[in-house]
Image (cartoon, rainbow, N blue to C red):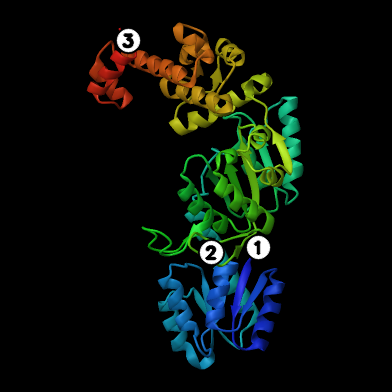
Amino acid sequence: MEAIGARVLIVDDDAASRELLEVRLGALKCEAVMAADGREALSAIRRETPALVLLDLQMPGMDGMEVLRTLRRDGMDLPVIVITAHGSIQSAVEAMKEGAYDFILKPFDPKHLEIVVRKALERERLTREVKILIEEVGERHHFVMGESAKMNEAVETAKKAAASKSTVLLLGESGTGKEIVARAIHNWSEREGNPFVAINCVGLSKELLESELFGHEKGAFTGAHELKKGKMELAHGGTVFLDEVGDISSELQTKLLRFLQEREFERVGGAKPISVDVRIVAATNRDLERAVSEGRFRLDLYHRLNVIPVALPPLKERKEDISPLAHYFLRRFSQEAKKTFNEISQEALEKLVAYEWPGNVRELANVIERAVVLGQGPRIELRDLPSRVAGTGPAGHTANLSYRGALKACRREVILRALSQSGGNRATAARSLGLHEKYLGTLIKNLGIE
């Protein structure tokens, strides 16, 4: 386990002990932060957000045991290794009961210190990953580049950006795979192995988004019963992906600008600055230059985000990528559905390539998933494609409809297929769709199905 870049707080009233520990941590490529007493330690924890604390138990004023109790009372869950003298094993045991991860004895053995520190940092890293749900197993975020020149150009720019620490702005229509590219940038960078955190800036209110980004202190507002670390804090050492950044409020634009400038922030309800090391990748399907000219987006924030722009082309401009993408989704969804699909008929593939894909790669993935779930296999046939893609029936023109119109056409088609497969039996069709029969009857009436 690599300890590179981990920030460790050393709390000891003895200057010589602090210096010795700093040297040992330096050999592990850790960044050491110092505190000479308990109160200074609590302040440093809130300010520096260390990954680990080395805490001396015997200190004047606020001792190590009181620091531990304060951390647990305030909901600050981070690994603490206590330091104690040979004659104070009982104190170390009490500290473990108060939530300490482990203990080391003075004078400490360098090899033992290294083992304990590495294990504690590994535990802390795994805990952060669980908290932010970044362990998404399988191939759901596998990056499929395609064969088009436009996509290859975007990928080459993204790879060059990954080798730097610069902020990246991904531009493109909804569904073009901006989050997939953001994850690829993270995986190509030296931050691979540290957290990747994605935040949808348009799916939350201003207050909730601020708390998600920066966290809040205990008692900051009604319902804030404990301290909560924000995604920026949890992603320390990794990458934060801000999706639909063009939709954030003017107040949050100001806070985000300050963070990009200073790499520090305050939690909601907090007054002390917290500094973190994260790489920002932002994305938007909006015209930010126009938003700036209309006064809806800060010019200085735009320049901070637009350091390395990467434009992702819509799927209709990269027709040669449709076949490899469709076959990738076929393999993925066949495995997930435990079905034996292994190819796409030439007739179906021609229709896939001819379609305009207003929903881009996301829509293609949905179409293939639908074909796998509803089809018989082992090959996707034309009949397995929705009518808007296959070009059959009145729904074949949904590419020119509004979002609501296209959604209505898709609903109509799914219900018609279920009714056809059930021989017109509404109860059977409702069960296959996972709907209540009465609700299915309402949909049939509203969608004009005879």
**Which of the 4 image quadrants contains residue 317?**
top right
In the current view of this chain or complex, which residue is farthest to the bottom? Answer: 87
Which quadrant is the N terminus positioned in? bottom right
Identify which amino acid the numbered label 3 is placed on: Ile
Q: CA distance from mark 3 to mark 1?
A: 61 Å
* Residue 250 place in picture, x, y as percent: 57, 45
- What residue is disc 3 on? 449
Quarter of the image where the C terminus is located: top left
Q: Is residue 130 above or below residue 150?
A: below
Residue that appears at 58% across and 28% down = 328
Residue at disc 3, secondary structure: loop
> In terms of depth relative to the viewer, which is nearer, 139 or 95?
95
Mark 1 Cα-neighbour bin, 10 Å: few <14, some 14–19, many ≥20? few
Secondary structure under tag 2 reads helix
Rate crowding at label 3 as few (under 14), some (14 to 19) or many (20 or more) other CA atoms within 10 Å. few
Give the x, y percent position of residue 151.
Answer: 71, 29
Instruction: Using the numbered discs, state the Cα–Cα distance from disc 3 to disc 2 in whole angstroms.
Output: 56 Å
Kindly identify the residue that appears in the image at 64 percent across and 74 percent down.
Answer: 33
Residue mark closest to the camera, 3 vs 1: 3
Sequence-first tag of 3 and 1: 1
Of tags 3 and 2, the one toward the viewer is: 3
The percent coordinates of residue 316 (x first, y second) are: 64, 19
| Mark 3 or mark 2, earlier in chain | 2
Residue that label 2 marks = 124
Which residue is the site of mark 1?
Answer: 2
Q: Amino acid at mark 2?
A: Glu
Identity of the residue drawn at 56% across and 9% down = 347
Depicted 85 relative to depicted 231: above or below:
below
Can residue 244 be seen here? The reply is yes
